[in-house]
Image: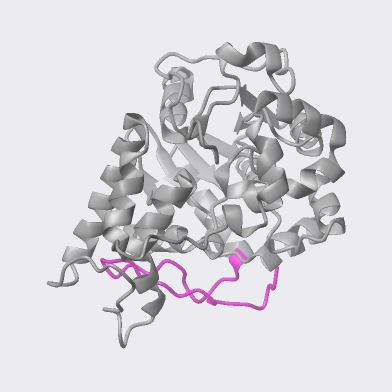
Amino acid sequence: MDTDRVGQTIAYGQYGHALVTQDRNVYEAARRRIHEAYANADTIAVSFSGGKDSTVTLFLTLEVARELNRLPVQVLYYDEEMIDPDTVAYVEQIATMPEVEIVWACLPLRHSLRSESRSNWYPWNPAYQSVWARKPPDYAIMSVPGFSLGGEYPDADSAIIQAHPEWGRVYMLAGIRIQESFNRRRALLTQGHWTSDRGRYLYGKPIFDWTYQDVWYAIGHFGWPYSAYYDKAMMYGHSMHNVRIAAWGNASSTAVVSLYRSMYPDFWEACVKRIPEMATIGRYGKTKALSDHLRKPEHATWQQWALHLLGQMPAEDQAIWIKEIKRRVLRWKMKSTEPFPDTPVSIYAGTDSPSQAVFNCWKYVCLLVAKNDHSMRDR
């Protein structure tokens, strides 16, 4: 964390609200936001993945909670079954901390999958219990009222919070950084603030303006623990910038699956039994067969090809992507009188966001549908 870097990210939402002020470094700004969260809630819950960003968010929250005498901190961890052994061990270490109360949730959340026969998989799916990649902890919750198989993270958040009325007004903090993706940056800019009201709870991103260098500097400077997965991944050739913790079966992890066989050979075998498609993903994940370089028939437009691919999907997935497409087209109509373009056409000339054109065309929609990667959707 560069404590001399002041106001590096100056951004404004649609209503002109400054997201970062110029009088604080990122460490002080994050602490101020967490103080603000404590002033507006009965309970702070940290959404924890075992990754570097949620690690920083948790330990910053613990700092503030000690100062305010608001310990323990609630931690919500979604165990996605096919998580590497080092990260599981790290989360178990966090769970033993006396200043933490953890909700270890093993729920059948919806995950995308690269497969010819199916487009999704669900960790801890009761129908596949005989081949689960590992056993859940004895203290894990396997179900919660109001959440059913195939639900998404906000659904699970709401259900768990509703199941704990003693928490009162809840403020959930997540380690979301806008450096990681264009969609995250756009969502924050559109929102105009680092926090949002999700009905049953407030949701905040106190380290949104941190870079990955800030994250690793803070972890090293303060001596905070972290998952040994990062060290192993970097030993196997990953850059510090690109190493991320995610469920192995996710479409978003396709390019790195090939490393898992070498890093965790025993667990790899268990995961292939759980999701046989992993063997193919591991073999071809870094090739053009599963790359983002999408092709279409010469006679078809990108819109026609996107709609064709959409028609091959199960009805459940179709409904999700139709909603996503409508949202993108509507946003385009708010800025242009021209039809939603087939290929990138910049309407942002003279602005600081010319790259938005890439994400607002049928060619990009076609990529979204082909990958069926729900992490790429607008949130």
Q: Taken as a whole, is the magenta stretch helix, strand or loop?
A: loop
- Residue in view at x 64 percent, y 13 percent: 129
235 magenta-colored: no
Position of the N terminus by quadrant: bottom right
Furthest-bottom residue in this view:
350
Whether residue 345 is visible to the viewer of this picture, yes or no, is yes
Rendered location of residue 265, percent (x, y) = 86, 36
Q: Nearer the viewer, residue 37 or 143?
A: 143
- Give the magenta range: 1-26
- Residue 3 in the magenta stretch? The answer is yes
Q: Is residue 356 above or below residue 278?
A: below
The image shows residue 222 at horizontal and vertical percentages of 79, 56
Question: For this view, does 367 lie left or right of residue 175?
Answer: left
Residue at 77% across, 60% down: 238
Is residue 226 at all visible to an observer of this figure? Answer: no
> Which image quadrant is residue 203 in?
top left
Left or right of 3, for residue 29: left
Task: Please tell me whether residue 359 is drawn above or below residue 36 in the rendered image.
Answer: below
Is 349 situated above or below 111? below
- Residue at 72%, 29% (x, y): give it: 271
Residue at coordinates 71% horizontally, 32% vertically from top-left? 99
In the visual, does 229 lie left or right of 107?
right
In which quadrant of the rendered view does residue 357 lie? bottom left
Along the line of sight, which residue is nearer the eye, 121 or 231?
Answer: 121
Q: Is residue 14 left or right of residue 146?
A: left
